[in-house]
Amino acid sequence: MKKILLSLALIGLTLASATSATRAFFTDQKVLGDNTFSSGNISIDVLKNPTEVYSYDSAVWSQSGIYPGWNDGVGETQVFTPFILKNTGSLPLKYKVSLLDQTDANVSANTDLLSELRFYVKFDGVVVDSDATFADAQSLLASHALNSHLAAGSSESLAEIAPYLPTTAVSGENGTVKFDIQVDSRQLDAADF
């Protein structure tokens, strides 16, 4: 009896295998291809502002031979270099402008001149201080830090910083002051909207 049951089980198993092996199914398939994720980028350029009329042709300035009450020949006693910031990246960004002292502090004439220099500081074309010390100008720029947004592909005028030597200056003869105007940027995040 065991042999008969075993034979029947084997026959049933063989029939089941043959039936499923010959069975046909209709099928279909769709591919949603070319799914791509790419990151954006943050990139900035600082350019000469072509809409402003000043006697300097570069976004970086250099002037020698200044003295108290110095005049550049066009009626200005300060060295203005207007420039614009352009977002050349693909993401909106926040930016800030910093004033970094690069003066050789080992030369007393340099530190004297730095202490005598005054700065005009403008935001959006409005003078916020016309007699700022270097430290005051740094503070003004820091208070304006990362409050400015710039969309991808757009540009705008930056804060203008113009150093000058007032007529009341009494020291700094033969001094040289160097400073960098630094622009830092970062991407906007959800908290910025």
Image (cartoon, rainbow, N blue to C red):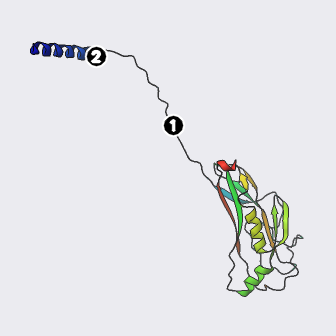
The residue lying toward the viewer, choosing from 150 and 55, is 150
Q: Quadrant of residue 147?
A: bottom right
Of badges 2 and 1, nearer the viewer stands: 2
Q: Residue furthest right?
A: 75
The residue lying toward the viewer, choosing from 28 and 146, is 146
Q: Position of residue 95 (x, y in %)?
A: 69, 58
In the image, what residue type sits under mark 2? Ser
Relative to 61, 88 lies left or right? left
The residue identified by callout 1 is 35
Q: Quadrant of residue 185?
A: bottom right
Q: Position of residue 48 (x, y in %)?
A: 75, 61
The residue identified by callout 2 is 20
- Identify the residue at image location x=83%, y=77%: 165
SS at mark 1? loop
Tell me if I can see residue 157 in this picture: yes
- Identify the residue at image location x=9%, y=12%: 1
In the image, what residue type sits under mark 1? Asn
The residue lying toward the viewer, choosing from 147 and 26, is 147
Q: Position of residue 120 (x, y in %)?
A: 83, 69
Q: Residue furthest front?
A: 1
Estimate how packed mark 1 is, as few (under 14), some (14 to 19) or many (20 or more) residues with alpha carbons within 10 Å.
few
SS at mark 2? helix
Q: Is residue 61 above or below residue 1?
A: below
- Identify the residue at image location x=49%, y=33%: 33
Estimate how packed mark 2 is, as few (under 14), some (14 to 19) or many (20 or more) residues with alpha carbons within 10 Å.
few
- Identify the residue at image location x=27%, y=17%: 21
Cα gap from disc 2 to disc 1, whole angstroms: 37 Å
The residue lying toward the viewer, choosing from 15 and 70, is 15
